[in-house]
Image (cartoon, rainbow, N blue to C red):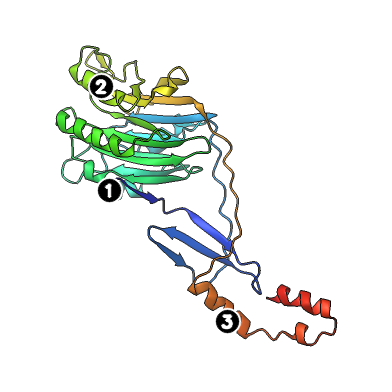
Amino acid sequence: MVAETLNADNQLFVNSSNLPKTKTIRMTLRKKHTHCNKNLRSQTKPSLPPVVTNKYFTVFHQNIRGLRDKTNELLGTLLPNLPHVVCLTEHHLREQELDNLSIAHYTLGAKFCRTNLKHGGTGIFIHESLAYTNIDLQKFCTEQDIETCAIKINLPTARIYVIGIYRSPTGNYTHFIKCIDTILDQLYKPNVEIIICGDININYLDENCNKRRQLDALFATYNLISTVQFPTRSLNGSISAIDNIFIDKSHRGKYTIDPFITGLSDHDGQIIKLGNISMQKQLHETRTIRIFNKCTIHDFMTKLSYETWGNIFDGNDVDSIFNNFPNTF
């Protein structure tokens, strides 16, 4: 089975407003356990991220041929209309390097980094205004054959899997096809969108390419179609479309895709906008709820032990006493 985990930045801010001397409890949600801040320190509301200006769901992909020292230039080319998802292949970074790398306004949602060979790798960055779930595809990855990672995004109007893939031209193509089929078989559901983007080293400008026909036949069983019909790489006077973005066929006639030249690689980028997935304004708010656990119960009992209840026992008016009790409680 494909495992899903919440991104670690999700936070729940709880205001225990009915307790004496109201304080704010910070709860951090992590996989399979909940941690309580025992000091019960007040927390400030986090600042809101910039609003994505693209009206429709937008994905950018590029084989970046080494991401190190290119993040500022990459962001500069994407501004001011930032895509919601940035998928980069061949980042050439080790896991620790990629984890410590920062692209303003984006969070690293998923990654694959080589441990044996040099170069390669795949990374998916998601705009910080969107919540996501990491999809663990590590067990399907083999260096050169298939280097993949994925995230799941829940939008008001759609649920979307975004899968990033890199396949080396010297990789085992049969193994690549088998793994892609297994991944899609586990993820595919009629009510969930799948978007696959990456450098698969299959030239989609060559209509007679057997590998293209085989991949198209596989993707057709999951209602996926290719979208790139323009060159993505020029080398020694020849052109090819070895980078691609695959989407559900229900988007046919309702999307736009264009080459995106950044000057940062010998591969041009591709940017796709899905016209039938409208991005409603993301609302950011803090909900106040009561959390019951050992930590909060202990804090409540401690506060009760210091309460004198003088405004209740010393009162004479029954109505006032009745109102003072829940107000203090």
Cβ atoms under marks 3 and 2 closer than 8 Å: no
Q: Position of residue 141 (x, y in %)?
A: 22, 41
Can residue 264 be seen in the rendering of this structure? yes
Of the two numbered discs 2 and 1 in the rendering, the one whose residue sits closer to the viewer: 2
Residue at image x 30%, y 39%?
186
Residue nearer the viewer, 71 or 300: 300
Image coords of residue 52 (percent x, y):
53, 35
95 up-or-down from 211: above or below: below
Crowd tier of the residue under label 3, counting other residues whose Cα lies within 10 Å: few below 14, some 14–19, many 20 or above: few
Question: Dot 1 corresponds to which residue?
Answer: 95
The residue under the point 61% across, 69% down is 23
Secondary structure state at the residue bearing disc 1 = helix
Viewer-side label of 3, 2:
2
Check disc 2 and report its element: helix, strand or loop: helix
Instruction: Name the N-terminal-most of marks 3 and 1.
Output: 1
Residue corresponding to mark 2: 217
The residue at the point 28 percent across, 34 percent down is 165
Q: Assign the C terminus to one quadrant of the image.
A: bottom right
Horizontal and vertical percent position of residue 327: 72, 73
Q: Earlier in the sequence, mark 2 or mark 1?
A: 1
Name the residue type under label 3: Thr
Which label was assigned to residue 302?
3
Alpha-carbon span between mark 2 and mark 1? 34 Å
User: Toward which corner of the image does residue 307 lie, by quadrant?
Assistant: bottom right
Identify the mark at residue 75; answer none if there is no mark: none
Q: Amino acid at mark 2?
A: Ala
Whether residue 68 appears in this view of the structure is: no
